[in-house]
Amino acid sequence: MDASIIKQIEDIVGPEYVSTREDVLLTYSSSASMICDTAKPDVVVRPRTAEEVSKLLKLANKYRIPVTTRSGGSSLQEEVIPHSGGMIIEMMRFTDIKLFEDLRSVKVGAGITFGQLDKFLLEHDLWLPMCPESALVATVVGNVAVNGAGPGSSVYGSIAELVLGMEVVLPNGEIIQTGSEANPHAPGPFLRYAFGPDLTGLFIGSLGAFGVITSVSMKTFKRMKHFHHETYGFHSIDAAERFLLEIQEHEIHTVFASLYEDRVLDLFMSMLGDEYGIPEYEWPLRTVSMTIGRLREDELNSDIEMAKKICEDLGGYVIGITELPKGEWELKMWTFVRACYVHGWHWRTLYHHQPPSGNRKSVEKIWEVMDEYGFLGHTAGFLSGHASMNMYPHLYADPEDPEEQQKIRDGHQDLARRLFKTGAVPFKLAPYWKDILQEIPDYMDLLRMIKEVLDPNGIMNPGVLGGI
Ligand SMILES: Cc1cc2nc3c(=O)[nH]c(=O)nc-3n(C[C@H](O)[C@H](O)[C@H](O)COP(=O)(O)OP(=O)(O)OC[C@H]3O[C@@H](n4cnc5c(N)ncnc54)[C@H](O)[C@@H]3O)c2cc1C
């Protein structure tokens, strides 16, 4: 990048917040995503205000510089890998938090992680009842930008459901506010669906392609204190899938409910069972590992009874092993992600949603691909709201074996295609969905049109949003 452009960037944010050092550029060339191509940006910039971001985007437009907005850098699907010769705008200096107790909401800057927010809300006996398992490094804004889901989603849905509004710097440098806060006289964030169409939703899951989010306003809830962890066994796939649907229908407060195959649990236990203190067990065909959470103990007890009844009415049984769901809920660490880190594998994940009754279709396709291509992986998923499951299969590869890594890349793409045909839907519209999305040309045309209106020079994270 031309030295005169670097000088202009330094004039905007101050030279101490601009870096072109090789080691820094190298650090920002990758993320938590594995088995993917990396690329070195030309410059990393760390602004502090929306006005600085605005000036940076105007400059990027003037010189047609590709911009990648980065927060925690923990995304897994290449979303934050920069463009060669481009600019990284790193948002971790946006550290403001403002609580609106009377409005049941909190406004957080783009640099606030889930861990920091939780610590802050704990002092007020409140919480944001959903977080990714990468909570200590992932930012709330970064998760909104990918529309993530995780523990808590089984009741509350994906993070989108908790957003009340946001401040966004558009690619042309204009700064806008969505939700009730768009009214400068409003007391703060209390309503997302204000002023007509849901403009907030336009930026949720936009992967940094439509602008830079500087803050989000989120719903807060009174902190739950009563939890129950349990495992439920089923000898039939039908019964296990039906169980997941019925616990939703009966409004049992399952803050996290995962569905596992026996062979996947066996693999996981062989790797991490001891560390989690999970006793040896002959797992049934399907196991639901579940945490119920409630504000009041009487509600919790009623939910526990009802869950047991639903399970038994469907021919299942209460296993009684609590360490697995407890670990998933309390340790806030993907058990399976952790398993492959422990083993030093590299992996690609393929996030997608299915209704509970579609779980078997995903499982079938994942095994089909793993068997055909000859690699290892898993098929786990969790309830992610009203009638949906978030499936997050991992495909493992030896980091030292380039051939195996290529096999994973090919198999991953192939799996995405096969999953789409089963009716699965992507919610993080990562670039590898691009070819498959040709099946829905009108939808993609609309997305492209929006992109062209907002970002006519195509500077914002080009290609990231399903190829747009
Ligand atoms: C161990 C592990 C476990 C994980 N578990 C989960 C999980 O349970 N659920 C889940 O959803 N994800 C999970 N992830 C993935 C990842 O942590 C989340 O997607 C996370 O929310 C990304 O946030 P981030 O701050 O790291 O964003 P980044 O990785 O920095 O960015 C993610 C995307 O958002 C864009 N972006 C970032 N900041 C902004 C901004 N201010 N304005 C506009 N666009 C922006 C980026 O350009 C990029 O496209 C996990 C990752 C790891 C490593």
Image (cartoon, rainbow, N blue to C red):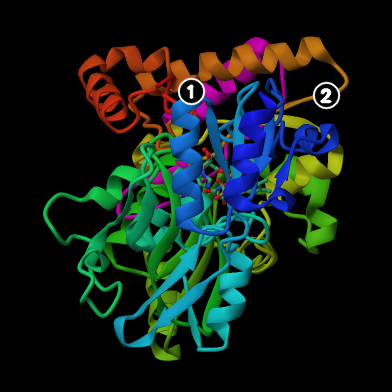
Task: Judge depth for marks 2 and 1 and give the one in front.
Answer: 1
Q: Amino acid at mark 1?
A: Arg
- Give the SS element for disc 2: loop
Asked whether residue 418 appears in the rendered view, the answer is no
* 366 magenta-colored: yes
Circle 1 Cα neighbour tier, 10 Å, few/some/many (<14 / 14–19 / ≥20): some
Q: Amino acid at mark 2?
A: Asp
Question: Which residue is under mark 1?
Answer: 64
The residue that appears at 24% across and 19% down in the rendered structure is 445
The residue that appears at 64% across and 68% down in the rendered structure is 326
* View extreme (right): residue: 400
Taking depth in this image into account, of 66 and 410 the one nearest to the observer is 66
* Position of the C terminus by quadrant: top left
Compute the Cα span from label 2 to label 1: 38 Å
Taking depth in this image into account, of 381 and 156 the one nearest to the observer is 156
433 sits left or right of 288 in the view = left
* 96 magenta-colored: no
Question: Which residue is under mark 2?
Answer: 398
Residue 333 percent coordinates (x, y)? 68, 57
Asked whether residue 152 appears in the rendered view, the answer is yes
* View extreme (left): residue: 196
* Position of the N terminus by quadrant: top right
Residue 2 percent coordinates (x, y)? 66, 24
Q: Quadrant of residue 339?
A: top right
Residue 181 percent coordinates (x, y)? 26, 68
Badge 2 residue CB within 8 Å of ligand 1: no
- Give the SS element for disc 1: loop
User: In the image, which residues are magenta?
Assistant: 361-390
